[in-house]
Amino acid sequence: MAPDSVVLDVKDVRQKLGGKQILDGVTFQVHDRVRPGTTTGQVTGLLGPSGVGKTRLLRLIAGLDAPDQGEILGPEGTPMPVGSVGVVFQNYILLRHRTVLGNLLAAGTANGMPRREAEEQARALLSRFGLADRADYYPAQLSGGQRQRAAIAQQLVKQKLFLVLDEPFSGLDSAALENVIELFSRIAHNHEDQTLIIITHDIRAAMMVSDTLLLLGRDHDTSGKIASGARIQEQIDLVAEGLAWREHVELDPKFVALERSVKARFARL
């Protein structure tokens, strides 16, 4: 893949639900990030208030629904390949009647992997995610953080170009949040072609882990009336701002100032 090439191209996407316009002309691109001598994936934070249409957009990117209008293209301007997008929903959907290892095996074999290959990859992922000693546990026996890691590992048994995560920071204390941010950085930067799209309303967490921020919101007319459908209101390149790929970036005064600015904008989305 050529440096700075487009890995995801969302063009004028529109969708109604129950006769109501939810998304109205959503357009943005995700570019391949390159750092000489360093494996670098892409992490895009999609921010927006509750009810603005973030989950609707997630489902369209993942191919779970089709837009009423517009198109979503992958690398080289081609339609997203079937099975190229992994999704981790907020409630960490796992098969309750299968063990953690069984969930990963099911994901691998369902994607056409031979069972032996799927098991090797599943066990390697469980070890990498600190879940090797939980392989024979059932989802109900795991903590919330462990279920989240298992759900992410499940999506990675078969290599995916994209991993979309729905509100992954919800309900986390500060220590758990740091662990999750570190985990996402490791996942994204494990492969040059890996792209994470994080759907969230947690501005600080998104800024700490992302290289690009997208603000999804509704237009306002001159009288202040809010439009019915949402679109991308702003795109912020955190690499250009010098606020990406750094430990403790949240302590930088420039980070604090940008966070304050995004929060002010967020209130008007």
Image (cartoon, rainbow, N blue to C red):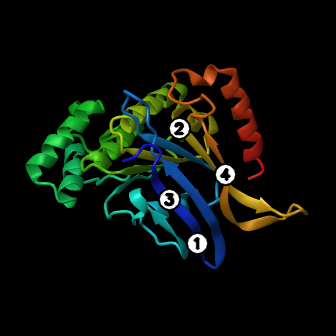
How many residues crowd around disc 2 within 10 Å: few (fewer than 14), some, or many (20 or more)?
Answer: many
The residue at 33%/35% (across/down) is: 190
Q: How far apart are marks 2 and 3 (CA)?
A: 18 Å
- Identify residue for label 4: 49
Residue to which mark 3 is pinned = 9
Q: Do the residues labelled 4 and 3 touch (CB within 8 Å)?
A: no
Please, what secondary structure does the residue beneath circle 2 have?
Answer: loop
Could you say where residue 110 lies in the image, as x and y percent from the top left? 21, 60
Who's the residue at 48% across and 65% down the image? Answer: 72
Task: Identify the mark at residue 210; answer none if there is no mark.
Answer: 2
Extreme residue in the left direction? 116
Kindly identify which residue carries mark 1.
15
Looking at the image, tell me whether mark 2 or mark 3 is earlier in sequence order.
Answer: 3
Distance from the alpha carbon under mark 1 to that under mark 3: 17 Å
Q: Residue 42 at x, y = what percent?
A: 45, 42
How far is mark 2 from mark 4, CA to CA?
A: 18 Å
